[in-house]
């Protein structure tokens, strides 16, 4: 299956085709992809189906792991452990057998909310987003976690998304999706904690709502567009550089994959998609593209002690 990439030259889009497609199970709400370079494996979630997917590029096999509750993100701790973000807290997951043990509770007493978009800062800190299970207005927050400590950074957010960081860790990005506005904030590179107030980043796009995002090695921001059939790429200064059109309207989150971080994987959702629509067969799929773009940036391990 081909995707379309539009590079913006002189303000006008120039389209070209690139190869893309990763076979796997169809997700209701595919989210949270992350790549482990040590094992050449990509992981992602179907949040609503309480499932974690594991795709090992060496054998090309996709494995499905059933989870006990709604979960949305994970980070690598070491060769043997992952830190899993769920509706009730942070759990250590044993990679070998999938067993879970509670590390830190997070909104465990709030049955209205669940985890959502999350990402590891270059310092090893983990920014973790929550939201209402039915996207209740203002029910979500963004938390900072590092070496066992949890702090709430922002509250009153409806749908936390687009959490990502500049390569040097000095800038953080996030969005409350319904506002359409991605925000940026100065950070302490050594800790991943804010040192200023958030301000708008780039002009809001009319091509879908901002969902998950990643930053490449040059500091460009790649954001999936819920309802926008793809991913948009912005320069550090907020200039739209590229649009990647995919055959699924509800694109949710990108991740750089491969040892050189030179491929882009994108999850999507099938929730509420009209079965008679043109993209129904692709909705909920996972897509991968070799964009011929500058190398991406792989996530560091999270620091738990």
Image (spheres, rainbow, N blue to C red):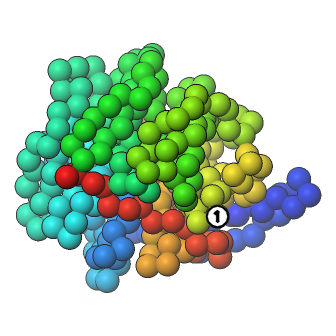
Q: Is residue 218 above or below residue 26?
A: below
Above or below, 83 against 154 in this view is below
Query: Residue farthest to the right?
Result: 10
Residue 193 locus on image (x, y percent): 44, 39
- Up the image or down, 204 lies above or below 164; here it is above
Q: Quadrant of the N terminus?
A: bottom right
Judging by the rendered image, the residue that carries numbered circle 1 is: 218
On the question of residue 124 being in view, the answer is yes
Taking the spot 27% from the left edge, 54% from the top edge, the residue there is 303
Judged left or right of residue 160, residue 49 is left
In this rendering, does residue 30 appear at all?
A: no
**Image location of residue 125, percent across then percent down:** 36, 48
Q: Residue at x 30, y 55 (%)?
A: 302
Secondary structure of the residue carrying tag 1 is: loop
Drawn side of residue 6 relative to residue 78, left or right = right
Query: Based on the displayed image, in which of its 4 quarters is residue 295 positioned?
Result: bottom right
Local packing at callout 1 (Cα closer than 10 Å; few below 14, some 14-19, many 20+) is: some
């Amino acid at each position: 299956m081909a995707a379309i990439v539009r590079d913006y030259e002189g303000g006008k889009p120039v389209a070209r085709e690139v190869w893309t497609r990763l076979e796997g199970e169809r997700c209701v709400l595919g989210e949270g992809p992350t790549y482990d370079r040590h094992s050449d494996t990509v992981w992602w979630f179907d949040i609503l189906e309480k499932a974690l997917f594991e795709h090992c590029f060496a054998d090309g096999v996709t494995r499905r792991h059933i989870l006990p509750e709604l979960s949305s993100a994970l980070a690598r701790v070491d060769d043997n452990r992952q830190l899993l973000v769920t509706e009730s807290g942070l759990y250590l997951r044993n990679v070998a057998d999938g067993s879970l043990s509670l590390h830190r509770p997070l909104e465990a007493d709030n049955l209205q909310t669940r985890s959502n978009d999350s990402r590891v800062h270059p310092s090893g800190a983990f920014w973790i987003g929550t939201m209402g299970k039915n996207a209740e207005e203002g029910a979500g927050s963004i938390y900072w976690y590092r070496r066992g400590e949890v702090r709430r950074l922002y509250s009153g957010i409806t749908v936390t998304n687009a959490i990502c960081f500049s390569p040097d860790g000095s800038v953080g990005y996030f969005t409350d999706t319904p506002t359409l506005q991605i925000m940026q904030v100065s950070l302490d590179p050594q800790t991943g904690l804010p040192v200023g107030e958030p301000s708008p980043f780039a002009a809001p796009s009319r091509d879908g709502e901002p969902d998950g995002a990643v930053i490449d090695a040059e500091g460009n921001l790649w954001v999936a567009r819920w309802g926008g059939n793809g991913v948009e790429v912005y320069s550090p200064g907020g200039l739209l550089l590229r649009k990647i059109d995919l055959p699924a309207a509800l694109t949710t989150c990108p991740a750089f994959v491969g040892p050189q971080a030179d491929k882009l994987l994108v999850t999507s959702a099938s929730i509420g998609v009209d079965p008679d629509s043109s993209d129904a067969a692709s909705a909920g799929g996972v897509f991968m593209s070799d964009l011929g773009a500058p190398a991406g940036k792989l996530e560091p391990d999270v620091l738990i002690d």
